[in-house]
Amino acid sequence: MKTVQMQDFSFTDITKTYGSKKVLAGVSARFPCGSFIGMLGGNGAGKTTLFNILGNADRDFWGRVSLRGNDVAYMRTESLFPAYMKVAEVLAFYRRFYPFDEGKAKQLLREADISEKSRLSSLSAGKRRMAEFIANFCTRSPVLLLDEPLTNLDIYARDFVVNSLIDCSLDARVVAVATHEISEFENMFTHVTVLRDGSMCPLTVAESIRASGRSIDEFYREKLQ
């Protein structure tokens, strides 16, 4: 497997409009190597819009992003793959376009009781979500973006995703999670930021929040006031 040089991930003055509505208004940040970023915000805050841009799924915007293409793996809220595809074909897609740890992917599929021969249409919504998480997780891209990764997952599957992410806590890449389910990731965040009305608060070191006696959830609620 090809070794990938890990890098910080930065974006500058990201602006996105839909007609006359400005969804993102000059958003900027730098995510340091080895960080686990919490991109927090309620529904409609702009999290998915920003991740679509950072994950190269939306190229109609103003601003600059430091890493593009196969340097960024992006698990979207909705599947990119047609239901008739087999899990093995999804892995083949990632193997073709990304530096990819196929052995790790197959191991995790076995642990999740997902057959490579299964068509996506035959999987439950939760199993399909897990398969796509595994495919993205097993890329070795410098950046991994996860948009609401726990959607449609039962307790077992949530634990599977969270534990997989804990296992990569010493990884040098950037992992960023857009979520409003803070409690599941509370102790994993190294940095957090909050999107609200198209603007983003400065990236904050999570340990400094904890040292002040506040939880990440309390910090988030303060930023929404």
Image (tube, grey):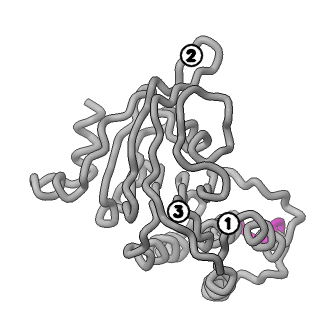
Determine crowd level at label 3: few under 14, some 14-19, many 20+ residues with C-alpha closer than 10 A. Answer: many
Percent coordinates x, y for residue 213 in the rendering: 10, 55
Q: Is residue 122 magenta?
A: yes
Determine crowd level at label 1: few under 14, some 14-19, many 20+ residues with C-alpha closer than 10 A. Answer: many
> Mark 2 sits on what residue?
21
Is 196 situated left or right of 214 in this image? right
- The residue nearer to you, when weighing 102 against 126, is 102
> Mark 1 sits on what residue?
132
**In terms of image quadrants, where is residue 51?**
top right
Image position of 98 with respect to 111: above or below: above
Q: Earlier in the sequence, mark 1 or mark 3?
A: 1
Q: Nearer the viewer, mark 3 or mark 2?
A: 3
Q: Earlier in the sequence, mark 2 or mark 1?
A: 2
Tags 2 and 1 touching, CB below 8 Å: no
Percent coordinates x, y for residue 147 in the rendering: 55, 52
Residue span colored magenta: 120-124
Determine the secondary structure under disc 2.
strand
Query: How much space separates mark 1 and mark 3, taking CA atoms?
Result: 18 Å
Disc 2 residue type? Lys
Q: Quadrant of the N terminus?
A: bottom right
> Mark 3 sits on what residue?
142
Q: Nearer the viewer, mark 1 or mark 3?
A: 3
Q: Residue at x 16, y 57 (%)?
A: 210
Q: Residue at x 37, y 61 (%)?
A: 35
